[in-house]
Image (cartoon, coloured by chain):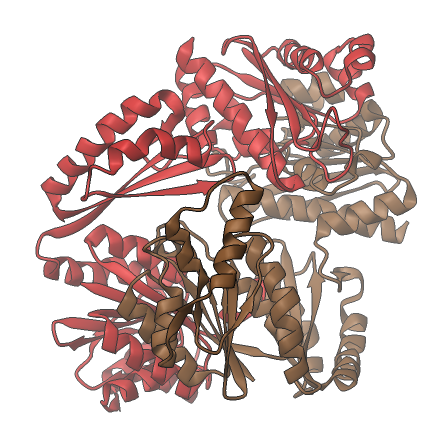
Chain colours: A red, B brown
Amino acid sequence: MRAEILAVGSELLMPGRVETNASYLTTRLLEIGIAVGARITVADDHALLESAFRTALGRADIVFATGGLGPTEDDLTREAAARALGRGLRRDPALIDALKARFARYGRVMAPVNEKQADVIEGAVVLPNDRGTAPGQRVDVGTGALFLLPGPPSEMQPMFEEQARPWLQARAGGRVIRTHVLKIAGMSESEVEQKVAPIYKTFENPRTTILSHPGLVELYFVADGDAADTVARIEALAAPVREALGDAIFSEDGRELPEVVAALLTERRLTVSFAESCTGGLATARLTDIPGASAFLDRAFVTYSNRSKVDELGVPAELLERHGAVSEEVAREMARGARRVAGADIGAAITGIAGPDGGTAEKPVGLVWFALDGAAGERTRRVQFVGSRDRVRYQATQAVFDMIRKGLLRS
Amino acid sequence: MRAEILAVGSELLMPGRVETNASYLTTRLLEIGIAVGARITVADDHALLESAFRTALGRADIVFATGGLGPTEDDLTREAAARALGRGLRRDPALIDALKARFARYGRVMAPVNEKQADVIEGAVVLPNDRGTAPGQRVDVGTGALFLLPGPPSEMQPMFEEQARPWLQARAGGRVIRTHVLKIAGMSESEVEQKVAPIYKTFENPRTTILSHPGLVELYFVADGDAADTVARIEALAAPVREALGDAIFSEDGRELPEVVAALLTERRLTVSFAESCTGGLATARLTDIPGASAFLDRAFVTYSNRSKVDELGVPAELLERHGAVSEEVAREMARGARRVAGADIGAAITGIAGPDGGTAEKPVGLVWFALDGAAGERTRRVQFVGSRDRVRYQATQAVFDMIRKGLLRS
C-alpha cells in the first residue's frame, strides 16, 4: 500500500514555520508497512486544495489530510475533499448536538458558524474527537481510504493511533516494513560507507541508506516481509555491520549521544564535570537536558577567557602563555581542574576556535582540543572540524560525549 | 505569480528528516512577491515524480524542483521533468567537458556515470554550478518557468540568489509582497492578540498573522502593492502597534533575543556572567553562540547542586536550607555571586524545576526564579512555565535574556 499526506493550511507556508504532522504520520505509517510516496503542504485555496486531493487520490491507496477542519472560512478541507471525490456533504444533526454538548460542558453556547464542523462527506465514517471540536472522517475508496484528521498534533496523533492505525493494520495483511537505525559517532559518512558497503551491497532486502548529520552518521536498514521475517532479515545484516563498526555504534534504539552517556554514568554511579571554552556551556546544557541529570552532574564551568581558566580551574598561567588556550596542555589542565574543583569522577574539557574569526595558519577556525581526566581514562584528542560556528560547537559536544562514552566502555 | 516547490528525494521522507530547501525558497520567493501555493516532497519514483511535475506545472506559473540532479540511478528529476513537459533530453558535450575539467581539478578522473549530469531538457538554459557537479536548468514555460536546482543547500542557495532571483525579479513587474516581522518577548499570544487586534483589524492590507513559539510571539505583517506603497502601508500599521506593545518588541530586523542582548552588551561595553541551575548552561551556550562573545562574557557557572551554589557562588547555606534552591532569596544570591566571582558588570541567575520530576504542590514543575544584579538593575522575577523539560528550560533562557534586555534599556 502506498500513501500520500496532505498538510492543509496557509500558515504552514509562512517563513520559519515547520510542519510536523506529515513527519509524524510518515514514521507511523512506515511502522505499519505503508510507504509514503509524497507529502504535500497546501495553502487554504479551494481550487488548489481540490486539485491536490484529486492528484493524491489518483496516485495513492491511502491519503491522509491534516488540518482545515475548523469552523472558519479558511477551513476548506471537507469541501475540497468532497468535490475531489465527486460526493456531496451533509450536515449531521447528531454531530451538531455533540458539538453543542461539548460547548455546554465548558459553560459556553456554540456559535452557529461551528455547525460547519458537522458537515460529513457522503459515505464517510465519522472519527470522534474527544480532545477538540473538529471530528475526523474516513472515506473508503476502493481498497484504500481517505482520512481527514484535525491539525493540532494533540488531537491528530491520538485520532491516528486509536482510529486510523487499527483500520490500516487490519488491511496490511501481516506485511510490514521494519526500519532499524544504527547511530554512529566518531566516523565520517565516507568512512562508514567504506566499511559497510561491501556488507550491505550483498543484501537486497533490507535496503540500506546512510544519512550524515553534524557529529553523527545514521545507517537505516529497511526490510519488508512478514513481521518475523523482517526481524531475521535485519539481524542478518546488522550482525556483520556491528562487527565491522565495533563501538563506533552508540545506539540502536533511537537514543542520542547525551542519553547514552547519561545512562552509562547513572548505571555506574559516576559524576562528570565540564570545563568548556569554545562550546560555552553547550555540552553541559545538552547533558542536563536529560531528566535526572543531578545524579551525574553537580556543577560545570564555562571558562571563556584565559583568566577564568586560571581562576576557576587552576590552569597554570605559564601554560596558557607558552601553548595558548587552544592546546593539548591547557585542555589537559582544564579537565583536571574541572574534576578536582567539582569533586567529580570525570573531568572533561573542550577548548577550540569556533570562529568565524580568531583562526590563524597554525590554529585555524574549527580546531578543537579535548581532554578527559578520571574514571573514563586520561586522554586528549585534537579534531579539526569544518563548518559554521554553531556547527563546530555542536560537533565538539558530540565528540566530547563520544570520548566519555568510549572511555567508560573501555575502562 | 504563483509558485510551487518540489523537493525530490526518498531520503527526505525518512523518519526524522527535515526538508529545508522548500522553506528557504518559500521565504525568498515571498520577498519577491511570489506566493507559494504548495510544497511537495516526492520520493525517487519515475511515475510519481512525473505526475508531481505535471500537476505543479498545471497549477503554478513558477515551479522549483530541488534535488535529484546527481549521477546515480535514483536521480530522476531531469527525466521526469522532461516527460512532464513533453520535451526531450539531449546530452550536452560542452557540459561533459566542464564536468571532466572539474574532476581533473581535484586530481580525479570522471566516471562515465557522471555524464548523465550533462543531460539538458530541450530549450532549457543551463545554470552553471561552481560549488558542485550538478548544473541547474531553467525551462521557460509560457510567461513562467521551471527551475531545476541541486539538492545540497550550499549549492542550491547561491544558484537561486545568482541565477533565479534576478530572472524572477525582472518579471515581478514592480509588484511586491513585503513581509515585516515584529518579535515580542514577555507576553503570551493572547496578551499580544488582545492589545493589537483592535489595531490590525482595521487594516485589510497589510494582513496580520500572529505566530506563537516557546518564549516568543511573532507578528507578521504582509503587504502587497508596489515597492514604495508596501513600505508605507506596513509603517502605517506598525506605528500604532509599536505604541501598544512598547519595549515588549525586541526586534524588527529578524534578530533573535540572544543577538539583541549581545549587541546591547557590546555597544555598552558591559560583561555578563550567568549562574545557571535548571537551565544547566543553556543560557550561556545560547549567548556564546553569537560571534565575538568573548567581548561580553568571561566565564559562567552551572551550579546544579546546593553545594555548588555555596562553593562557587557563595550562596549562604542557611538560605538554601531555609528557602530551598528554587527561591527568590537564593536566585538573588546566585546572581550576586556570579557577578562578583566573574568580575562582571551583570550577574544573572536562573533556578527552577525543569521537570519532569521534582515538583511539589508549593513548587510545581515549571516554576523558575530569576535574578539580576549589577548594571542591568537589581531585580527578581518568578515565572510559572508550562510544558516539557526542554521547553521549560528554553523558555527560561528567553526570559532571562528579556530581563537583561529590558534592564539595560531602562537603566
Q: Is residue B319 above or below residue B90?
A: above
Q: Is residue A319 above or below residue A267?
A: above
Q: Is residue A308 left or right of residue B88?
A: right
| Residue A106 position in % (x across, y down) | 42, 70
What residue is at 31 percent from the left and 24 percent from the top? A244
Judge by depth and name the residue closer to the eye, B310 or A178: A178
| Residue A131 position in % (x across, y down) | 35, 64
Q: Is residue A396 left or right of residue B6?
A: right
Q: Is residue B191 something one can see in this rendering?
A: no
Q: Is residue A198 left or right of residue B324?
A: left
Q: Is residue A58 something one can see in this rendering?
A: yes
Judge by depth and name the residue closer to the eye, B3 or B205: B3
Question: How many tags in the picture?
Answer: 0
Give the quarter of the image for residue A146. Answer: bottom left
Quadrant position of the N terminus of chain B in the picture: bottom right
Q: Is residue B343 left or right of residue A107?
A: right
| Residue B388 position in % (x across, y down) | 49, 45
Give the quarter of the image for residue A355. Answer: top right
What residue is at 15 percent from the left and 38 percent from the top? A233
Q: Is residue A366 above or below residue B183?
A: above
Judge by depth and name the residue closer to the eye, B311 or A307: A307
Q: Is residue A238 above or below residue A16?
A: above
What residue is at 29 percent from the left and 69 percent from the top? B48
| Residue B346 position in % (x across, y down) | 83, 36
